[in-house]
Amino acid sequence: MRWRQPVRQHVSHQKILTLSVIKLKNYIQKRHMPAPDILSAEFAKNPYPFYEEMREKYPLYFHSATNSYVISRYEDVERAFRDPAFSSRHAETQFEPVYGRTMVQMDGREHALNRSLVMQALGSYKLHDKYIPLIEENARQLLDTFRAAGEVELVQAFTSIFPISVIATIFGLPNQDLLLLKSNADKISSYLSNLSQNPDVAAAGLQARQELEAYLSPIIQQRRQNRGDDLLSSLCYAEIDGVKRKDAEIKSLSMLLLGAGGDTTDKALALMLRNLIEHNDQLQSVRDDRSLIDRAFAETLRYSSPVQWLMRLTLDNVKMTGGTIPANSTVICSIAAANRDSNQFENPDQFNIFRQDLDVSRAFSGAANHLAFGYGKHFCVGSNLAKQEAIVATNLLLYSLGDLQFQDNELPEEVGFFTRGLKTLRLKFTTRLFCN
């Protein structure tokens, strides 16, 4: 029997050696796995696991297909939005072809003056006296088309139309033009996220700009001759350094506000309702206490960022986590990844309207500690309007629709890259007999 013992020991060592080699190979493979391809079908289906991998293993990497550097950690994305070494001049190639030159691509004093113009125009309306009644009226009209039906596909019937209807109304544009405005806004949105350079998408976006310019030109001329009580009139008469804006500048700014206002709030509103229905206990809390709507909206912006990324251009070599970005480089700042960074938020992959590490008191201002509206000087000028739209719409929906559930008992899927939302939100409900 003695001769068998060494053989058994030899086999045991072989097994250990084999297992060690396998582990080493797996470790090497993991170390050399390529960074996530942000244009892949897998990424488009569900980017959130990839965002975690990016933050952990590839906080900075070069994506050759887009000729861009990608950053994903909160501290790095937040820095890219506030550090003067990162410029918005990338918009000359991304935004200008479909919007013209706007404050999105401006820096320094030029940006400050143009942003001030928009803020003055928006501020010329007393929010509760002017905006709120318009927002409520638009929401009620849409709600009345389905509130008695017991079921609805809410994206098509409400959330995709409501925000742009509000923007169009405060611009003083005819209600019958909504479909034209929405169609062109959608084509421009597709153009902005067309990193794969699909020629059909690009052509449609450029055509949409031409159609919107042709639509706005006579209306601007009319407002210049007969000033109305609307946002477009305010823009026509607003001055920078004593000089009124040219028609081309007003058209560009109007298209930007129509596009941005119609393509982000719609997604955020649908996502918030999906998140609340999925977490029914939190939905019930909001039903019981409507002051929690702004919390639910802010948490949705963090958890399900409707704007997934923004781009910047480096003016100098910039040292970041994971390496150095060369000067004159395009940088993709992953907002959605940053907003789920565990170094910034506790249990970031959980939807929780009661979380203590999201400051709701400043969630709709330039001091927000989520990045869904950007950060710093380029913080979204329409953030407060978006908040008011969400509060009004959610209040009316919850007053009118009881026992909200998914029709197929399946969680609706998100779609999109630059902006991300729900393609459909099929709901069933009981009709409530009051609407206050």
Image: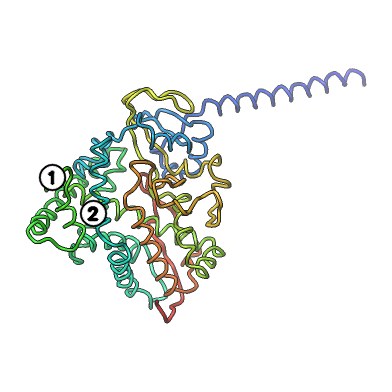
The quadrant the C terminus occupies is bottom left
Q: Residues within 10 Å of mark 2 (few under 14, many from 20)?
A: some
Using residue 322 as the reference point, say whether residue 239 is left or right of it: left
Q: Residue at x 32, y 26 (%)?
A: 315
User: Foreground residue, 334 or 361?
Assistant: 361
- Rendering coords of residue 99 (x, y %): 21, 45
* Three-letter code, disc 1: Val
Q: Residue at x 38, y 36 (%)?
A: 82
- Rendering coords of residue 230 (x, y %): 20, 61
- Rendering coords of residue 426 (x, y %): 42, 65
The secondary element bearing badge 1 is classed as strand
* Three-letter code, disc 2: Ala
Work out whether 427 lies above or below 210: below
User: Foreground residue, 314 or 213?
Assistant: 314
Residue that sits furthest to the bottom in the current view: 433
Q: Residues within 10 Å of mark 1 (few under 14, many from 20)?
A: few
- In the figure, residue 148 lies in which quadrant? bottom left
- In the figure, residue 233 lies in which quadrant? bottom left
Q: Which residue corresponds to mark 1?
A: 243
Q: Earlier in the sequence, mark 2 or mark 1?
A: 2
Q: CA distance from mark 2 to mark 1?
A: 15 Å
The secondary element bearing badge 2 is classed as helix
The quadrant the N terminus occupies is top right
Q: Residue at x 40, y 37 (%)?
A: 333
On residue 121, which mark appears? Answer: 2
On residue 323, which mark appears? Answer: none
